[in-house]
């Protein structure tokens, strides 16, 4: 089972995160991706596009429509208290005291920890 959480698979995200490394090709073979909230440092669209449009994403409730418009269609939403299983790994969405808004014009969704 290969599970990524909030992947950043390029050497920068926006103008604020730089030189975080360059992944090798093994990141292209993942079973699922867990996204905790929609901030730019957690939901990096170019990184998700690198994984391919058929990668299974698990995201906070309210994010699927936004991701569908970005060409990412294999999306399951979970809300606080719900659980999802990745092979032998169980993840539960828990509330986080953190804004779930994607600035400047993106949606606002629940921020979660798992």
Image: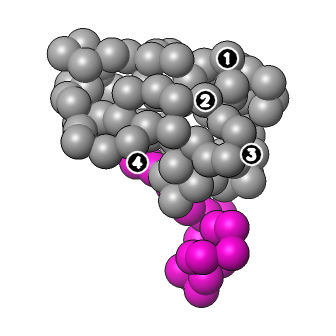
Report the mark closest to the observer, 4 or 1: 1
Residue wearing tag 3: 49
Residue wearing tag 2: 107
Counting from the top left corner in percent of width and height, residue 82 is at 24, 13
Left/right placement of residue 45 relative to residue 88 reads right
Disc number for residue 5: 4
Q: Is residue 10 visible?
A: no
Residue wearing tag 1: 65
Left/right placement of residue 59 relative to residue 9 reads left
Q: Earlier in the sequence, mark 1 or mark 2?
A: 1
Cα separation between marks 4 and 2: 20 Å
- Height in image: 77 above or below 99? above
Cα separation between marks 4 and 3: 15 Å
Counting from the top left corner in percent of width and height, residue 29 is at 58, 47
Q: Earlier in the sequence, mark 4 or mark 2?
A: 4
Neighbours of disc 2 within 10 Å: few (<14), some (14-19), many (20+): some
Boundaries of the magenta span: 1-25
Report the mark closest to the observer, 1 or 3: 1
Neighbours of disc 1 within 10 Å: few (<14), some (14-19), many (20+): few
Q: Earlier in the sequence, mark 4 or mark 3?
A: 4
Residue drawn at point x = 61 percent, y = 29 percent:
107
Residue drawn at point x = 25 percent, y = 19 percent:
80
Cα separation between marks 4 and 1: 20 Å
Q: Earlier in the sequence, mark 4 or mark 1?
A: 4
């Amino acid at each position: 089972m290969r599970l990524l959480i909030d992947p950043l698979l390029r050497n920068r995200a926006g103008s604020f995160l730089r030189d975080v490394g360059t992944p090798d090709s093994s990141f292209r073979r993942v079973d699922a991706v867990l996204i905790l909230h929609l901030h730019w440092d957690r939901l990096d669209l170019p990184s998700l596009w690198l994984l391919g449009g058929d990668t299974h994403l698990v995201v906070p409730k309210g994010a699927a429509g936004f991701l569908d418009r970005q060409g990412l269609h294999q999306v399951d939403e979970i809300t606080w208290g719900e659980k999802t299983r990745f092979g032998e790994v169980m993840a539960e969405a828990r509330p986080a005291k953190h804004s779930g808004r994607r600035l400047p014009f993106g949606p606002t969704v629940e921020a979660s920890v798992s």
